[in-house]
Amino acid sequence: MTGLCFEHAFVINLDHRTDRWAKISENLAQVGIVAERFSATGVDDLLNDRPSMALKHFLQRVDGSSPSAEHKLQTTWACMRSHLAIIRLARDAGWPSVLILEDDCEFEPFTPVVLKRACEQLQGREWAALYLGGTLKKGGKKAAISANLCEVSRVRLAHAYVVNASVYQQILDEAPESGLPLDWYYSEILQASANTLMVRPVLARQRLFDMSDIEQVERKPKYKTRQALQRWWARMRYGRSSY
């Protein structure tokens, strides 16, 4: 797909999760996004790269004590390392932006036309990150600035987002020291100081009925009338656009 706000895209995928790579490859082909596979950092790859004590204490406060606490700590840290490795690659290569996807991402059929329009509307604007999907948390803002873009804050999840070169170094410096999971760092720290945008309607969601490598639970549908109506209206308005 041409005319986008990124030239490079990567899918974070653990080597043994060939099932996820197959699913997202098929989905990306359907919506015209070309992305390379990025071998994810696994727990066994961390070696002496230990999670920070601040992150451990944060997860203990949020989740409490559980038999899976150590697993979540290690996988959360490994996940951050994967994202940061792509950002470091983009920085070193001098790319103006990069699209980062997690392998449980799934794009809506109307992605081609909406993404192209959103990228056109992005031209001439200052921005730090562009979310293609995510969850707006309590206290966050969402203000329309064009037909297909919103200014946002306190957006959680990091399964599909574009990072601008203007914040590569900030993320690399701050995220590991923040004591937060990466998506929390973005929502609570980066978005408070950097102009963050989101495409509307939402293009990318986390795949349902897929076991989370971090949470170790299967994602199940939660029916919300407003979201269902928004998706229905978007599909009616934009259709299954070709690229």
Image (tube, rainbow, N blue to C red):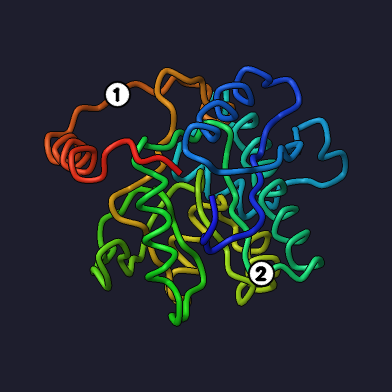
Q: Which amino acid is tagged 2?
A: Tyr
Which quadrant of the figure has residue 139? bottom left
Q: Position of residue 102 (x, y in %)?
A: 57, 39
Horizontal side, residue 197 vs residue 224: left or right: right
Who is closer to the viewer here, 47 or 191? 191
Q: Eyeballing the image, is 104 above or below 9?
A: above
Q: Residue at x 78, y 46 (%)?
A: 50
The structure residue drawn at horizontal position 64% and vertical position 50%, both measured from the top left corner, is 9
Q: Is residue 200 left or right of residue 42?
A: left
**Tag 2 or tag 1, which sits nearer the N-term?**
2
Q: In the rendering, which numbered label is found on residue 165?
A: none
Front-lying residue, 34 or 204: 34
Amino acid type, residue under disc 1 in the picture: Pro
Residue, x 70% and y 65% (percent of image)? 172
Q: Which mark is residue 168?
A: 2
Q: Position of residue 175 (x, y in %)?
A: 63, 62
Residue 165 in percent (x, y) is at 64, 72
**Residue ranking furthest to the front:** 242
The answer to whether the residue labelled 1 contacts the one labelled 2, judged by CB atoms less than 8 Å apart, is: no
Q: Height in image: 61 above or below 198? A: above
- Judge the density around disc 1: few (<14), some (14-19), many (≥20) Cα neighbours within 10 Å: few
- Residue 187 sits in quarter: bottom left
Spot occupied by residue 78 in the image (x, y as percentages of width and height): 70, 41
Q: Is residue 168 left or right of residue 239?
A: right
Q: Which labelled disc corresponds to residue 221? A: 1
> Label 2's element?
helix
